[in-house]
Structures are given as C-alpha cells and as structure tokens.
Image (cartoon, helix red, strand yellow):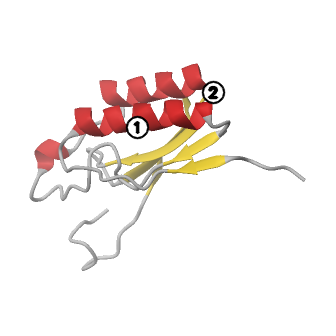
C-alpha cells in the first residue's frame, strides 16, 4: 500500500494580501516538511484570497507572478508538494507544485449565477 502524509491547511486567506498569504504558506510548508509530510494542501484562492474580477480586478495575479515562484522555490527546498489556488488574470485557478516545478494549472468552472464569477 502506498501512503502519503498530507498537511491540510485551514487558514484565513485575506483578500488582496498576497504578501501576507505567502508568508503563511511558507511557514506552513516548512512545518509540513518538519512533520514529515509529502504534500501541503491549501484552500482555493489561498494566495490571493477570494477575488471577484468584476469588483476587485487589482487582486488578480498572473501565473508568472513572483509570489508563485517563491512558493514553488519553497516547495523544492522543503521537498513538499504544494496545492494552492490564486485568483488569476484568467479563470479561477488551482495550482500544484512538486519539487519546485509547477504541475498545473487546473481551472475551475463556475456556473453562471453562482458566486458572481464567470469562466
């Protein structure tokens, strides 16, 4: 049987506070490594906080944003895969990292009338 030890991060992801959210991610990735976890799982839109592109387009980030690169680096340095999400300058995105290399993105489709977002 194959087992993976995971850390499930139930954190508050402040809207638009990319630097603060990144700091929380980095701390938890290091903690996951110390606890022997192979994977750290974060809430959707965890780096940017939930952002409605029609209301707060300034909270959206591209996938080549330096924050994502820093989290990818921490993934590689700590040997912990990371699954996180951003409010992307495109449809909402869920990203994964393993050994510092992106393994995604996977885009979420939201039905019209649900949450005010459209894909």
Q: Position of residue 23 (x, y in %)?
A: 33, 32
Quarter of the image for residue 37 reads top right
Point 34% across, 52% down: residue: 45
Q: Which residue is mark 2?
A: 79
Is residue 20 or residue 67 the one in the foreground? 20
- Residue 58, which numbered label? none
Determine the residue located farthest toward the bottom in the rendered image.
113
In the rendered image, is residue 104 in sight? no
Q: Is residue 94 left or right of residue 65?
A: right
Point 25% across, 36% down: residue: 20
Q: Position of residue 67 (x, y in %)?
A: 33, 29
Quadrant in the picture for the C terminus:
bottom left
Q: Position of residue 117 (x, y in %)?
A: 24, 66
**In the picture shown, does residue 44 fall above or below 74?**
below
Instruction: Characterize the local packing of mark 2: few (<14), some (14-19) or many (20 or more) Cα atoms within 10 angstroms.
Output: many
Point 47% across, 51% down: residue: 9
Q: Position of residue 55 (x, y in %)?
A: 9, 58
Is residue 31 or residue 38 the one in the foreground? 31
Point 35% across, 38% down: residue: 24
Q: Is residue 103 left or right of residue 87?
A: right
Q: Secondary structure at mark 1?
A: helix
Q: Earlier in the sequence, mark 2 or mark 1?
A: 1
- Residue 25, which numbered label? 1
**In the picture shown, does residue 76 fall above or below 87?**
above
Instruction: Characterize the local packing of mark 1: few (<14), some (14-19) or many (20 or more) Cα atoms within 10 angstroms.
Output: many
């Amino acid at each position: 049987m194959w087992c993976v030890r995971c850390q499930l991060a139930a954190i508050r992801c402040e809207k638009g506070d990319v630097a603060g959210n990144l700091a929380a991610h980095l701390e938890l990735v290091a903690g996951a490594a110390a606890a022997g976890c192979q994977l750290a799982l974060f809430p959707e839109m965890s780096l940017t906080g939930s952002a409605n592109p029609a209301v707060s387009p300034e909270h959206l980030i591209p996938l080549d944003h330096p924050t994502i690169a820093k989290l990818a680096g921490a993934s590689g340095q700590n040997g912990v895969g990371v699954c996180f999400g951003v409010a992307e300058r495109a449809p909402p995105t869920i990203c994964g990292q393993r050994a510092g290399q992106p393994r995604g993105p996977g885009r979420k489709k939201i039905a019209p009338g649900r949450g005010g977002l459209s894909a």
